[in-house]
Amino acid sequence: MPAGMSGTPIKQQSTAAFHAQAVVSFAVSLAATAVGTVRLDAGARVRALLAVAVLYPVTSALTLAKVIRDRQEAGRLANRADQARPEELLAAHDPFEKP
């Protein structure tokens, strides 16, 4: 039977290199933005506004990623629960048993 046809979801995991690349990219982008904000030829209020304007979408993106991940995990758990009951009934059923 081909992979994925058994009803068991295929678990996809990213590699350690991909994880490291994502973390480093995130850190570099935040550091570059922070350096640019600090070195900006503007008043403290303008720099503070820019910093808040950058941090707001960053925290929103992290929250959105967590919400999406939580929904996917909840969907997987519900799918497993839905599949477990019929499989349990089929395993317990004896077609040769007289009623």
Image (spheres, grey):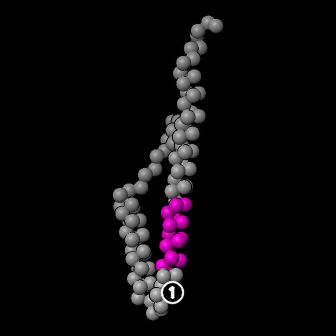
Q: Position of residue 23 (x, y in %)?
A: 39, 65
Q: Quadrant of the C terminus?
A: top right
Find the magenta span and give its range: 50-64
- For residue 63: magenta? yes
Image vertical order of residue 61 relative to residue 3, above or below: below
Residue at left offset 53%, top offset 71% = 56
Q: Residue furthest bottom?
A: 41
Image vertical order of residue 82 relative to residue 28, above or below: above
Disc 1 element: helix
Instruction: Give the image quarter of residue 85.
Output: top right
- The one nearer the camera, 8 or 59, is 59
* Magenta-colored segment: predominant secondary structure: helix
Image vertical order of residue 35 relative to residue 79, above or below: below
Residue at left offset 41%, top offset 85% = 38
Q: Disc 1 marks which residue?
A: 46
Residue at left offset 47%, top offset 91% = 43
Drawn side of residue 1 relative to residue 14, left or right? right
- The one nearer the camera, 65 or 14, is 65
Residue at left offset 41%, top offset 65% = 22
Q: Residue furthest right?
A: 99
